[in-house]
Amino acid sequence: MPANRKLEKVEQALLSQNKFVVLQDVLITPLERLKPRFDYIFLDTAPNAMAPTIAAYKAAEYFLLSAIPDPFAIAGLGDALADIEASRMHGNPRLTLLGGILSMMERRTNLAKTLRDYVQEKFALDGHESLKFATTTDRSTEVSKAQREGKTLFETAPIHKVTDQYCQLAREVELRIQKFSGK
């Protein structure tokens, strides 16, 4: 379910239909109904603690954080980690941080290296091995092209370096889920 600017208005829409709705819980039942039909369900939320993001924290089993190599985006990871911890304490104790990915990297810059090192350290929670994914994705016009067309990279650029990087990330995500779930 891709993020959409209209989701910012979901709170008003839900409350207009039922003033007693518990906004944090709106995704729990729909996701439970969908689970038997899908191997994985990804919710792409905005990087803020608005109703859709909080509902995702409350309903999800795993959370994957993504950031672009920008100081403000990287700094926001700390807020997201705090939000995940708060969600664990207030309603979803099974929520597990799967890891963090750096997207749209320009590998040749000093800023990219500094931010990569920072995320590596930030995701080494409680002295454990870092949860930063080894895979990073490069900046590419193919991503915005796919977004404009409302398609995936696999449809618009099946043979491309960034598409391969997302395939590698998918393998890494699957291995990490298996590791965390004990399967």
Image: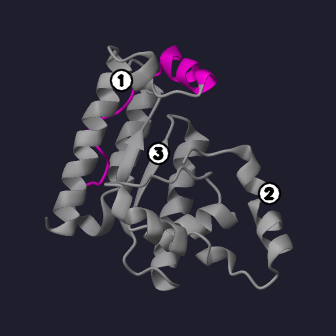
Q: Check disc 2 and give the amino acid type.
A: Lys
> In this orientation, which residue lies closer to the viewer: 35 or 176?
35
Numbered disc in front, either 3 or 1:
1
Q: Position of residue 114 (x, y in %)?
A: 41, 35
| Label 3: few (<14), some (14–19) or many (≥20) C-alpha neighbours in 10 Å | some
Q: CA distance from mark 3 to mark 1?
A: 16 Å
| Residue 13, quarter of picture | bottom right
- Write down the region rendered in magenta: 130-149
Q: Earlier in the sequence, mark 3 or mark 2?
A: 2
Q: Is residue 137 visible?
A: yes
Q: Is residue 159 part of the magenta span, yes or no? A: no
Q: Is residue 100 left or right of residue 11?
A: left
Q: Is residue 82 left or right of residue 21?
A: left
Where disc 2 sits, the SS reads helix
- Give the residue at mark 3: 66
Where disc 1 sits, the SS reads helix
| In this view, 70 is above or below 76 | above
Q: Which residue is pictured at 31% across the width and 28% down the height? A: 165
